[in-house]
Image (cartoon, helix red, strand yellow):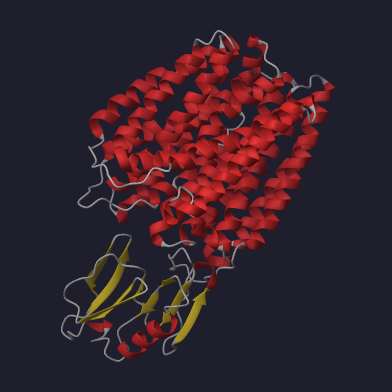
Amino acid sequence: MSSASLILTDRGLALSELKAVGAQGSTKVLAASSLGCCLVFVSSAVVTVALAAIGRDMRLSPLDLQWVMNAEFLPLAALTLVAGALGDRFGQKRIFLGGIALYGLGAAAIGFAPSFAPLIVGRFLQGLGEAMILPNGLSVLGQAFPADEKARAVGIWSAAAAVASGVAPAIAGAILDHGSWRTTFLMLLPVVVGALAVGAVWIPKDVPTSHARVDVGGAVLSTVGLGGLGAGLTNLTNGSGPNLWVLVTLIVGVGGLAGLIVTQRRLGDNAMLPPSLFASRSVVGANLFTALLFGAFTVMLTLIPFLMIRGAHLPTLVAGLAFIPLQVLITVVSPLAGMLCRRFGRRLPLFAGGAVVALGCAMALRIGPSATYWADIFPAILLLALGMSLAIAPLTTLVLTSVEPDRVGTASGVNSAVSRAGSLFAIALLGGVLQQGGPQLFSGFHMATSIAAGTCGLATLAVFIIEPGPTSTSSRETDPCCVRSQPAGKVERKQCRGDDRGMLNYPNLVGIYQKPRRVPKNLSWVHRGCGVTLGSHKSSKHPRRWSMRPDRVQIEPAGATAGKSFSGSNTLLKKFVREYMATSATISMTFASV
């Protein structure tokens, strides 16, 4: 049910994708990617509404119900990154379509499952397919559009996914009130067939990269580690106590994660999780914040529909419709939260978002046996939606701007996987609640919401691990790091610590430059140092303005009043590079002709 928040988190994968050479924006590619990726978010939304009916019909224990959820989260958390590497190695279109086919096979297995074991196999196949669909579908989308059209395309993709994940549980609720829960999964099969057809026809064939490394060992160890810990915690919270089986699974899980850390350190930059990625405080803080916040959020959005159906005895259709306001608010408000980032830096919106989500968890303590939707449930959902709206956009921006440009895709993928891992462990701890009934169900729910509120409080503390970013008071600033230009006549070096960017600001700000991939041939000189390219144009007749794109440097006419040359500032620029290139991983400069 946390589909809208996951949509906005995952879209960073598309925004970080470098445009393919010669690619043109294609509405057909956008439609194919949107239709395939919608399946990822629809599945978790449907199963949350159907969970109570599945347990009642198949006579499942609380332990079984937890695995109905976590059988999907486990491959999503463990295999998303390696699935992206598989796309690079064997072709993103091929892996994308293969993931859709696996997803359809899983949905069919669930719909016709005679017992618990085939049901879990189907859920695992769905999760495995989703791990293949998401990174490759977003990469296909990111490569199909140039930089100036990519944000709009990703916005349309996000809106389509949010609409699908909001409508699907409502349809599932209507089906459950008049039919079988199996139909809610079988109704996905026509969508799967349509996604396969349009993907095969509309997505252009890509060229696999034969030298792309696939970290199979890392994928296996992460699956063993997360699966072992998930199994141990699930059994522990279902009243088993610290018996031999629980201890063995926990030891296996810890051993798998320890082995993952050792192998990733040995592989270095070739690893699935490059250790150097976590050298930044901001990356560590962002992922810790993500795990804690999304874990608490998943607890609330799993238990509230379950409680509405089994505790308050509200119609399943009402439970399906309950979170449509949440989907709408997150989708609409999240883009506006970017303004808070530019005005106040990135810590304050994250802190405020975590605090408001904690308040929403506390508000859910009012839900009782005689609860009504608008008076008791909707206020909590409203606060949850508002808090996530405040946090998601700054969190995505933070992840995309805290690492080197060539690491943005990996950082975004790691953050997406961490959000699923947080959800997996949160569900693993819900056994004590799901096994309750009657008044005890509400007592367990209130205990879980209190713990979720405390977890959100820990998430707000994790914000202080993040490096403080600069703020901007100008509405014209569009730089995600909120760089502020200096007054005319003033030259000042400014270090943006959170992003390791050295800034040299000149009067009459013209542009911001960071790691251009190729340089125009008509520059009088080019200096390369620490990945930075500096240049000047001596022509006084045709003054130039530099403008940055994710994959190129473009020179455009700036008008006759822009100045004549950079001759007065070349010495300063050279001196800046010599003096500071050793202290910043990435050096960006703002300057104008003088």
Determine if residue 462 is in view: yes
* Tag count: 0
Q: Residue at x 43, y 32 (%)?
A: 38
Residue 480 lies, in percent from the top left, at 46, 63
Query: On the rendered structure, is 426 left or right of 545?
Result: right
From the viewer's perspective, is residue 56 above or below residue 297? above
**Res 197 quadrant in image:** top left
Residue 491 lies, in percent from the top left, at 43, 87
**Res 384 quadrant in image:** top right
Q: Residue at x 37, y 24 (%)?
A: 101
Query: On the rendered structure, is 529 left or right of 287?
Result: left
From the viewer's perspective, is residue 365 above or below residue 51? below
Which of 213/68 is in front?
213
Q: Which image quarter is the N terminus in?
A: top right
Residue 364 lies, in percent from the top left, at 75, 37
Residue 530 lies, in percent from the top left, at 37, 73
Determine if residue 135 is in view: no
Which of 120/565 is in front?
120
Q: Residue at x 45, y 32 (%)?
A: 130
From the viewer's perspective, is residue 486 above or below residue 218? below
Q: Residue at x 33, y 81 (%)?
A: 592
From the viewer's perspective, is residue 516 above or below residue 197? below
**Res 279 quadrant in image:** bottom right
Q: Which image quarter is the C terminus in?
A: bottom left
